[in-house]
């Protein structure tokens, strides 16, 4: 079982990359973890929002297998407390399937991606940049594993 964070676009802000690397490294103590970036579309400004979502959707779907559990980070997803999220991660990892969390592009996901997903998670009702979400999410994933293991990182 592996966990992958699949993102649309590259991380170009150094402080975001540093935070992502910090928590990815910590997380790797608990589970094989990787971040996979889908390059931004070329000539995206010449495409409509729907066309961008469709093309990004095709690229996302090409990176997941039929056996993967696919969870979208989506504003319409379920909100969890950190402890609730830890319980959900515990259930997901118990299946033994690879888990792919997906952060889409600025316009969200295409209908085929929504149709393929196994769940949706919202980090907040607030909007964050797609770059910041990477670090925030990986920290929450790390926090979930420390909660599962009963380690003193999280305080209630």
Image (spheres, helix red, strand yellow):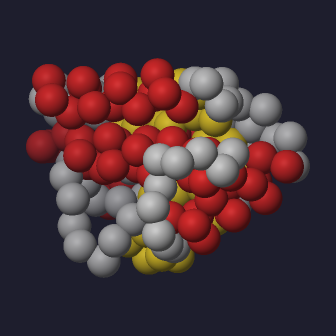
The residue sitting at 65% across, 31% down in the picture is 30
The residue sitting at 62% across, 59% down in the picture is 86
Question: In the image, is residue 135 above or below residue 23?
Answer: below
Give coordinates of residue 62: x percent, y percent: 60, 33
Along the line of sight, which residue is nearer the eye, 82 or 111?
82
Question: In the image, is residue 3 above or below residue 127?
Answer: above
The residue sitting at 51% across, 42% down in the picture is 142
Give coordinates of residue 134: x percent, y percent: 34, 42
Looking at the image, can residue 116 be seen?
no
Question: In the image, is residue 8 above or below residue 95?
Answer: above
The number of discs equals 0
Looking at the image, can residue 93 be seen?
yes
Left or right, 15 with respect to 9, comes to left
Q: Quadrant of the N terminus?
A: top right
Along the line of sight, which residue is nearer the eye, 121 or 19?
19
Left or right, 147 with respect to 38, comes to right
Left or right, 81 with respect to 49, comes to right
Tell me which corner region of the image, top left, top right, bottom left or bottom right, holds residue 146: top right
Left or right, 34 with respect to 37, comes to right
Instruction: Report the residue that reaches farthest toward the front.
Output: 152
Instruction: Report the residue that reaches farthest toward the right.
Output: 95
The residue sitting at 45% across, 61% down in the picture is 155
Give coordinates of residue 127: x percent, y percent: 22, 67
Give coordinates of residue 95: x percent, y percent: 87, 49
């Amino acid at each position: 079982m592996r966990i992958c964070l699949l993102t649309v676009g590259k991380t170009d802000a150094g402080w975001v990359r540093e935070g992502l690397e910090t928590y990815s490294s910590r997380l790797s103590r608990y589970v094989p973890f990787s971040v996979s970036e889908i390059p931004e579309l070329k000539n995206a400004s010449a495409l409509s929002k729907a066309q961008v979502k469709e093309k990004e959707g095709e690229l996302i779907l090409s990176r997941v297998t039929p056996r993967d559990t696919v969870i979208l980070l989506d504003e319409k997803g379920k909100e969890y407390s950190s402890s609730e999220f830890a319980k959900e991660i515990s259930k997901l990892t118990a299946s033994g399937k690879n888990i792919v969390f997906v952060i889409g592009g600025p316009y969200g996901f295409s209908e085929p991606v929504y149709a393929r997903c196994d769940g949706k998670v919202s980090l907040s009702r607030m909007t964050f940049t797609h770059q910041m979400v990477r670090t925030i999410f990986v920290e929450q994933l790390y926090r979930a594993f420390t909660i599962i293991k009963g380690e003193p990182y999280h305080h209630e």
